[in-house]
Image: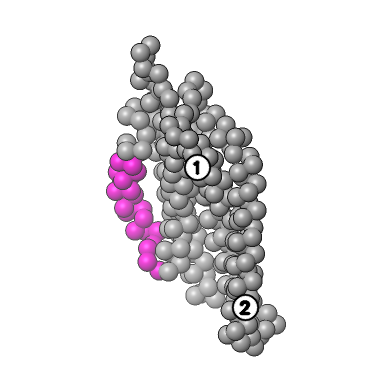
Amino acid sequence: MAKNRTENMTVLEHIGELRNRIIVIVIAFIIAVVFSFTQADYIRHLIASPIEGFSLVYFSPPEAFMANLRIAVMVGIFLVLPVVIYENLAFLFPGLYRSEKKLALGVTGGVLFFFIAGVLFAYFVVMQLILQFFLGFQTAQLSPMFNVSNYISFVFNLLLVFGLFFQLPMLLWVLSKMGLISADTLKSKRKYAVLIMLGAAAIITPPDIISQIILIVPLLILYELGVWAVMINERKKTDETAA
C-alpha cells in the first residue's frame, strides 16, 4: 500500500513532503546547536579530559566565543543525525520494497554502529596516545598551552577520521553487494592491506611500537570483519541462486 501511495503522489506532492522534512531537520539542528552552545563549557571539558596537565588558551577577544560556537555546531551535527536519518528513511521507505527496506535499515545501522565505535576508540585510546606523546616534550622551561581553536579542530578531525575509518567492513560489504570484490580477492590481497594499515598506523600514531600495535590491531579486526561479511554475502547469493 505504501508503494502504491508513493506511485500515486504527484511531483509537487513529493517536493512538498521533501520540503517539510527539510524544515524539520533545520529546526532540529537549530535546537541542537542552541542546546550544545549552552553546554559548551562541559563539552570542552570532555574533549580536554583525556589528558590532564595542560590548559587551553585563546589569543583574541572573540576567539573563545567562536570556539564555543564551533563546538556547538559540530556537536549539533552529531545530535541531529538521528533526525536526519529518520526523515530520510521516512521519505524513501514508501517507495521501497520490503527487501530494499531491510537493506536500507541494515546499512544505516551498520554505518552508525561502526562510526560510533570509531569515535569512541579515537576518544579513549588514540587521543591519549597522541597527547601523551606531544606532552612528553614539556620541560621546566617549556610548558604546554594549547590554543583552544586549534585543539578543538584537532579533536573533532581525529574523531571524524576514525569514525570514517571504521566504515571499512561496511565499505567491503557494499562493494561485495555490487559485485566489485570477492572474499577470495580480499584474502589474496591481505598482505598488501596489512602493509597499508602499518603505514597508516605509522603516520597517525606517535613513533613508538606500542602505539602502532594498539592501532593496527583494531584495523586488522575491521578488515577481517569485512572479509567475513563478504563471505556471508557470497554464500547467501549462492543459496539464492541454487533455490
Q: Residues within 10 Å of mark 1 (few under 14, many from 20)?
A: few
**Left or right: 226 as drawn, with respect to 77:** left
Q: Residues within 10 Å of mark 2 (few under 14, many from 20)?
A: few
In the image, is residue 196 part of the stretch drawn in magenta? yes
**Residue 117 on image: x %, y %:** 53, 45
Three-letter code for the amino acid on which mark 1 is drawn: Met
Which of the two labelled residues, at mark 1 and mark 2, occupies the earlier sequence position?
2
Q: Position of residue 24 (x, y in %)?
A: 65, 64
* Segment tinted magenta in the rendering: 179-201
Q: Is residue 195 left or right of residue 162?
A: left
Compared with 231, 3 (above or below) is below
Asked if residue 7 shows in the view, the reply is: no
What is the three-letter code of the residue carrying label 2?
Gly
- As drawn, the label of residue 16 is 2
Verify whether residue 197 appears in magenta.
yes
Residue beneath the point at 52% across and 66% down:
236
The residue under label 1 is 66
